[in-house]
Image: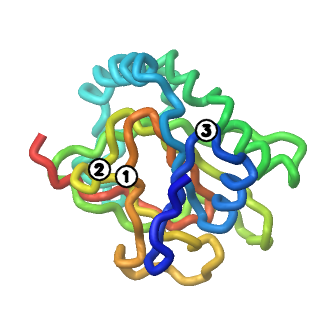
Amino acid sequence: MNSGSESSPTLCYFSESDSFEDQLTALKRDSAIVVTNLVSDQTVDTVRAELQPFFDRIGGQFEDDFNGYNTRRLASTLAYSMRAAALIEQPHTLKLMDALLLPHCTHYQIGSSTAIEIMPGEKAQVLHQDDVIYPIRVPGIEWQASVMFALTDFTIENGATHVVPKSHTEDHQPSDHDATVQAVMSRGSALVYLGAAWHGGGANQTSD
């Protein structure tokens, strides 16, 4: 486990074999964690190959001020990639979801499965929370959480997701990205984050 510097906002990085309780504690404390190398290269390659023709054909259908005008999106990922089921069913991330959600409900369900491709030249997305669809907040109870699998290496330059650590405990909206860290991670890794975590896609500053 790598927790980084104590003097600036950081995300904790774990491997699947690290203490599960440490991972859960960090997730509840920091709003998000990264778990490395959860998905094999073969699975990543297959999912990418299945999704790419649809990204190219219909990926621009959700372009707007919020989603961006140079970001491709596919909703209902399983409609385009059957192998994406291996991501949705990934045992370790499901164990984290169980630990977060099941203490407060009898069951939970998938709210969305979306594939995103941030293209060169895209600007950073506005920071936002995913759980604003729920009208109330109860301290200690999470209404939703998300897992973002990297199908390519996430880098500062190509738009790795910005996260504001510990932002799920705050009531104010961050005014800019100064307090964020980017979830830099290798392909096959996953960013796990709470629904109340402030986050947003990064700017893709690459040329290809």
| Amino acid type at image mark 3 | Glu
The residue wearing badge 2 is 155
Instruction: Tell me which residue sits at (57%, 22%) in the image.
Output: 85
User: Can you say which quadrant of the picture contains the C terminus?
Assistant: top left
Residue 206 image label? none
From what the image shows, is residue 11 above or below residue 13? below
Foreground label between 3 and 1: 3
Q: Amino acid at mark 1?
A: Val
Frontmost of labels 2 and 3 is 3
Cβ atoms at labels 2 and 3 below 8 Å apart: no
Residue in the image at 55% along x and 83% along y: 172
Structural distance between the alpha carbons of marks 1 and 2:
5 Å
Q: Tell me the SS state at disc 2.
A: loop
Task: Name which of mark 1 and mark 2 comes first in the sequence.
Answer: 2
State the CA–CA distance, disc 3 to disc 1.
17 Å
Q: Residue at coordinates 41% horizontally, 77% vertically from top-left? A: 179
**Residue under the point 44% across and 33% down:** 188
Q: Is residue 63 above or below residue 153?
A: below
Give the residue pinned by disc 3. Answer: 16
Left or right side of 160 for 70: left
The numbered disc on residue 184 is 1
Q: Choose the circle earlier in sequence order: 2 or 3.
A: 3
Q: For the residue carrying disc 3, how many other residues have a C-alpha within 10 Å: few (<14), some (14-19), or many (20+)?
A: some
**Residue 167 on image: x %, y %:** 56, 73
* Residue 1 rendering spot, x and y as whole percentages: 56, 52
Question: Under tag 1, what secondary structure?
Answer: loop
In front of the other: 78 or 139: 139
Task: Decide which of tag 3 and tag 1 comes sooner along the chain.
Answer: 3
Using a 10 Å C-alpha cutoff, classify the residue at mark 2 as few (fewer than 14 neighbours), some (14 to 19) or many (20 or more): some
